[in-house]
Amino acid sequence: QVQLVESGGGLVQAGDSLRLSCAASGRTISSYNMGWFRQAPGQEREFVAAITWNSGSTYYADSVKGRFTISRDNAKNTVYLQMNSLKPEDTAAYYCAARQYIFGSSSRPSEYNYWGQGTQVTVSS
């Protein structure tokens, strides 16, 4: 089992930056591909970014490409999401998720095995 805990959310203004962290426990994340997803009220959970187990590849949703950066520190068992130039439409609960690396990366929430409880990001205009 992998336990994931997100932190770093908050209320910011449009154009500001935030860095989300996802701390894992229970198992090392070095054998997991990791992803960030978000969910706004009344909407489905959507893919934001993903990173392979060795940071060899990263993937982004078109809506965040060029503004968000996913990274990981396997020694710290932590994954990060640096969010710059935030927009009101980025407002959502943000979740990190883990998927065993042998299955590859994915943008589908259903293909991730472990989830955190989320951290709220609110961007005011």
Image (tube, grey):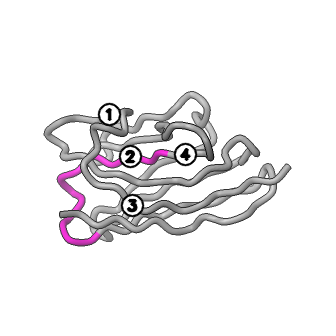
Q: Nearer the viewer, residue 72 or 47?
A: 47
Mark 4: few, some, or many residues within 10 Å (few <14, many ≥20)?
some
N-terminal label among 1 and 3: 1
Q: Is residue 83 above or below residue 3?
A: above
Q: Position of residue 13 (x, y in %)?
A: 81, 56
Start-end of magenta stretch: 25-37
N-terminal label among 2 and 1: 2
Q: How many marks?
A: 4
Residue 35 drawn in magenta: yes
CA gap, disc 2 to disc 1?
A: 8 Å
CA gap, disc 3 to disc 4?
A: 13 Å
Q: Amino acid at mark 3?
A: Gly
Q: Position of residue 67 (x, y in %)?
A: 63, 41
Q: Which mark is residue 29?
A: none
Circle 3 sits on which residue?
A: 116
Q: Position of residue 99 (x, y in %)?
A: 25, 46
N-terminal label among 2 and 3: 2
Disc 1, disc 3: CB below 8 Å? no
Q: Is residue 85 left or right of residue 103?
A: right
Disc 2, disc 1: CB below 8 Å? yes
CA gap, disc 1 to disc 4?
A: 17 Å
Circle 1 sits on which residue?
A: 106
